[in-house]
Image: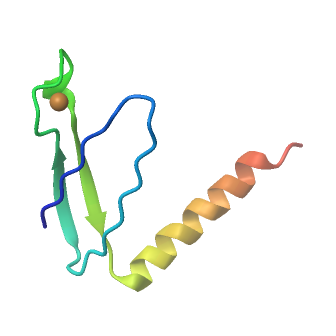
Amino acid sequence: MRLKQNAVPGQTIHLHFTPTTPGTYAILCTQLCGLGHYRMNATLRILPPDQFAAWLSAKEQAAKQETVTP
Ligand SMILES: [Cu+2]
């Protein structure tokens, strides 16, 4: 999977794509952008629909518990 989009400070840039193959993919900065460039990486996890639904449900439950005040 390959996709590239420049990030511009102060601008919101919408990017849409539909991954079709579950897996774990590296996200890397492709330009020498500054002192923190060597740390500019992340991981993209593509889950099958049932696993994604379970992940989303867990996140929603966690968010609800954080917003409840005793
Ligand atoms: Cu960079």
Q: Is residue 27 left or right of residue 9?
A: left
Instruction: Say which quadrant the N terminus sits in.
Output: bottom left
Please tell me whether residue 43 is drawn above or below residue 1 in the rendered image. Answer: above
Give me the residue at 18% from left, 18% from top. Answer: 34
How has the structure been colored for display?
Answer: rainbow
Residue 55 point in image, percent of width and height: 48, 68
Residues 27 and 57: in front is: 27
Q: Residue furthest right?
A: 70
Residue 10 point in image, percent of width and height: 45, 30
Residues 7 and 21: in front is: 7
Residue 7 point in image, percent of width and height: 30, 38
Q: Residue furthest bottom?
A: 50
Q: Is residue 41 left or right of residue 46?
A: left
Please tell me whether residue 54 is drawn above or below residue 4 in the rendered image. Answer: below
Q: How many marks?
A: 0
Q: Is residue 31 left or right of residue 41?
A: left
Please tell me whether residue 65 is drawn above or below residue 45 in the rendered image. Answer: above
Q: Residue 25 is drawn in which quadrant? A: bottom left
Q: Residue 15 is drawn in which quadrant? A: bottom left
Give me the residue at 66% from left, 54% from top. Answer: 63
Displayed-image quarter of ligand 1: top left
